[in-house]
């Protein structure tokens, strides 16, 4: 995960989106959610605001201060617990009946996605839930069934 700064051509290459690590000297690239935390991000934003705010980018746009929301996340892992229980009955050694029950996302964890990593008011805010369909990853779901073999 790498926070980005949008709206300014900071390196003169014509791109208006640049990773924070390239805009702020001394920042590590791609370290967030892998060793760098919210304090590191806040320090990098403060450095950006103290060194670049008020100057002009390569296109002549005046750079405005960046801000982070009061609560944000670097993304969450997808957690899922699926369980299946099967009971098999044997009839006359040749016929089998298996009855099963399944639970998908047994703990009903809201797996959130759609995080924006452009630094601004929507930084680190989830916008969707993971895969809202029946089965793994979505809301808790139950399923029962049977299988006959001969």
Image (cartoon, grey):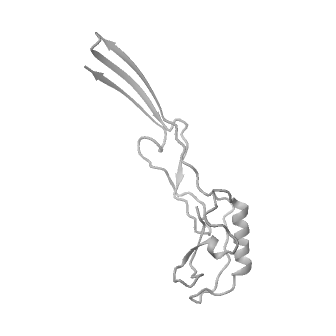
**For residue 17, above or below residue 54:** above
Q: Residue furthest bottom?
A: 60
Tell which of 27 and 88 is nearer to you. 27
Q: How many marks?
A: 0
Which quadrant of the figure has residue 39? bottom right
| Picture coordinates of residue 51, whole percent (x, y) | 72, 80
| Picture coordinates of residue 104, whole percent (x, y) | 47, 37
Q: Residue at x 64, y 60 (%)?
A: 32
Q: Does residue 76 appear to the left or right of 37 in the view shown?
A: left
Q: Residue at x 27, y 14 (%)?
A: 94
Q: Does residue 142 appear to the left or right of 59 in the view shown?
A: left
Q: Residue at x 62, y 74 (%)?
A: 22
**For residue 81, above or below residue 37:** above
The N terminus: image quadrant: bottom right
Q: Residue at x 58, y 80 (%)?
A: 8
The C terminus: image quadrant: top left
């Amino acid at each position: 995960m790498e926070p980005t700064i949008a709206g300014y051509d900071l390196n003169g290459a014509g791109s208006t989106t640049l990773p924070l690590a390239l805009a702020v000297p001394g920042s590590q690239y791609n370290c967030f959610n892998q060793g760098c935390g919210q304090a590191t991000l806040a320090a990098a934003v403060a450095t950006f605001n103290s060194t670049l705010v008020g100057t002009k980018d390569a296109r002549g746009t005046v750079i405005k201060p960046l801000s982070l929301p009061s609560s944000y996340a670097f993304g969450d892992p997808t957690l899922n617990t699926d369980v299946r229980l099967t009971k098999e009955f044997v009839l006359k050694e040749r016929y089998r009946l298996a009855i099963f029950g399944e639970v998908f996302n047994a703990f009903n964890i809201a797996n959130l996605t759609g995080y924006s990593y452009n630094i601004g008011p929507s930084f680190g805010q989830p916008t969707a839930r993971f895969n809202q369909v029946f089965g793994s990853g979505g809301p808790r779901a139950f399923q029962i069934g049977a299988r006959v073999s001969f």
